[in-house]
Image (spheres, helix red, strand yellow):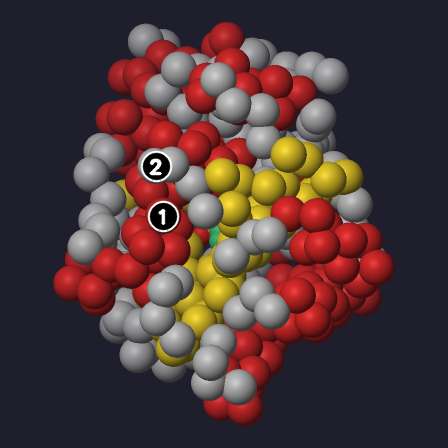
Amino acid sequence: MNVLITGGMGYIGSHTCVQMIAAGITPVIVDNLCNAKAEVLNRVEALTGVRPRFFVGDIRDEAFLDSVFAQTSVKAVVHFAGLKAVGESVSKPIEYYDNNVNGTLVLLRSMRKAGVKSLVFSSSATVYGDPQQVPITESSPTGATTNPYGRSKYMVEQCLTDLFAAEPDWSITLLRYFNPVGAHPSGSMGEDPQGIPNNLMPFIAQVAVGRRDKLAVFGDDYATPDGTGVRDYIHVMDLADGHIAALDKAGSEAGLHIFNLGTGKGSSVLDMVNAFSDACGQPVPYEICPRRPGDIAECWASTEKARQQLGWQATRSVAEMTRDTWRWQSQNPQGYQD
Ligand code: NAD
Ligand code: UDP
């Protein structure tokens, strides 16, 4: 089966391509390379022996997408393409709504013309805002988002819900990721943020490899066991497998399906610093700093629904997440080099 992967050159998309090929699915990639390097395709090929078809272009270009569908006979779309930096979304809301919301609408129009009505969408735990209770289930309240990035994900979820209400022959799966981290266990693929990393794990990795002096820990006065923020970190390979489970089980049936993709376990910032120090064999320097505006104290997923309905659960530990990240970072200290 051919599956179109928008944003397939990015962090999660590239790992999903590798796992799809192993599962006998043929990925067809569309990416405009605004946050990825062309070298990714060589790494996917080296790992799998397959060089996926890759169309360089923008999902907001409807004629481009129409021509991709006309050439590829894809049966489903996994939609990763979008902008994802929370802080940047505050200063560039138009770019975020245009890429994430408008880009998705253009994609949906093109899919409908091509008769492709099966979509898996990259949503985020950010749609839950500051949760009233943990673990967060799929029926926990959504919408109290705190920044344009989060609102763009919530808006797309609503667009897709309305589309399904109007056209119930679609199969739409919303996957709400918790905190994706880690890298391919070979060390040849991983997360390669441009500029200063916003997220915890790539920042720690760059400190460990000597690209940055120390980690700023954003707050140690939360109501959590050690005072630092608690999140549900999930290995990117588990996340990739979750997409294949979603395509297999839910993607074939018409419906609107919603799943959390997390591990169900929370780890604090200091837990992650300590696990990374173990993985790289040296302490990771850090200093306690003020809270980051907009951060929540803790969040982790209820994983029951995905386990029961997709037959999927995360299996990789925090030790594997940090070990694989370190292997990637130490083998590729400057990330992908084109
Ligand atoms: P990423 O930036 O590594 O990958 C996104 C890819 O999409 C990049 O390769 C980029 O070049 C491409 N892209 C962006 N805009 C495009 C456009 N208009 N047309 C074509 N290509 C475009 O990000 P990622 O971490 O792999 O995230 C993938 C998806 O998962 C995103 O939608 C993101 O919002 C969502 N998500 C990510 C996280 C996370 O922490 N990484 C958490 C929750 C949800
Ligand atoms: N964090 C931190 N220093 C950093 C980046 C993140 O202390 O340089 C903390 C952040 O406050 C949160 C956790 O690490 O408690 C995860 O943050 P990240 O940005 O990776 O994910 P998100 O905020 O989206 O859950």
- From where the camera sits, is residue 128 visible? no
Would you say the residues marked 2 and 1 are in contact, meaning their CB atoms lie under 8 Å apart? yes
Q: CA distance from mark 2 to mark 1?
A: 8 Å
Q: Position of residue 146 (x, y in %)?
A: 57, 70
Q: Position of residue 9 (x, y in %)?
A: 62, 36
Residue nearest the viewer, comparing 209 with 310 = 310
Identified at 51% across, 57% down, the residue is: 75
205 vs 196: above or below: above
Q: Position of residue 64 (x, y in %)?
A: 81, 53
Residue nearest the viewer, comparing 71 with 58 = 71
61 vs 153: above or below: above
Q: Position of residue 103 (x, y in %)?
A: 72, 63
Quarter location, residue 91: bottom right
Of callouts 2 and 1, which one flags the residue occurring earlier in the amino acid sequence? 2
Q: Is mark 1 within 8 Å of ligand 1?
A: no
Crowd tier of the residue under label 1, counting other residues whose Cα lies within 10 Å: few below 14, some 14–19, many 20 or above: many
| Mark 2 vs mark 1: in front | 2
Q: Is mark 2 within 8 Å of ligand 1?
A: no
Give residue 244's mark.
1
Identified at 34% across, 25% down, the residue is: 322
Q: Secondary structure at mark 1?
A: helix
Q: Label 2 is placed on what type of residue? A: Ala
Q: Which residue carries the number 2 mark?
A: 23
In what quadrant of the picture does the C terminus appear?
Answer: top right
Residue nearest the viewer, comparing 303 with 326 = 303
Residue nearest the viewer, comparing 276 with 12 = 12
